[in-house]
Image: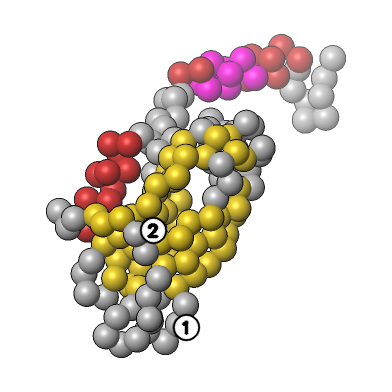
Amino acid sequence: MTFITGATRRAFLGTAGSGLALLALAPVVAWADAKMVADEIAKLFGDKPLKEGRIKLDLPSIAENGLVVPLSFEVESPMTEADYVKSVHFFAEGNPSPLVASFAFTPMVPKAAASIRIRLAQTQNIIAVAEMSNGDVYTVKKEVKVTIGGCGG
């Protein structure tokens, strides 16, 4: 039996078998954990103390499908030249990469808020970290239980 390309069935099966063998030897996806998230936050903010408050995080407690998890946030700030939100970063403790999303703001923005959809591979904590113009850093954490993972692996 020959294929359109002229290859024999035996050659095709041999090539397919080699491909499967390579997949078996491929490195396993390393999932982020709490330490990896802490390391990423330390890279961004050094040893600045993380304060609680000012971030309103809207995430479901249970996500039926990890492919499309709605995330909304707002950071309390007057958004003036003297006092505004510089950036907000989101981290996941169980995804292939700890950083999920980042937002940058200026005093010209009337409100430090946004809505997105994120992918979550498994049940995990989502950590939001907001940096203010005066250097203060605020954080909030919420666990999301995922029934069907969305990042593959």
Q: Which residue is denoted by mark 2 in the rendering?
A: 89
In this rendering, is residue 121 above or below 100? above
Q: Can you see residue 104?
A: no
> On residue 23, which mark appears?
none
Regarding mark 1 in the picture, which secondary structure is present there?
loop
Q: What residue is rendered at 49% in x and 70% in y? A: 113
> On residue 110, which mark appears?
1
Q: Position of residue 16 (x, y in %)?
A: 65, 19
In this rendering, is residue 101 above or below 15? below
Q: Quadrant of residue 61?
A: top right
Q: Position of residue 48 (x, y in %)?
A: 17, 57
What secondary structure is the stretch in magenta mostly built from?
Answer: helix
Circle 2 packing at 10 Å, graded few (<14), some (14-19), many (20+), is some
Regarding mark 2 in the picture, which secondary structure is present there?
strand
Residue 2 in the figure: left or right of residue 137 = right
On whether residue 126 falls in the magenta region, the answer is: no
Work out how far the residue at label 2 is from the one at label 1, CA to CA, in angstroms: 19 Å
Name the residue type under label 2: His
Q: Which stretch did the figure color magenta?
A: 16-23
Q: Nearer the viewer, mark 2 or mark 1?
A: 1
Q: Quadrant of residue 150?
A: top right
Q: What residue is rendered at 41% in x and 32% in y? A: 31
Q: What residue is rendered at 64% in x and 47% in y? A: 68
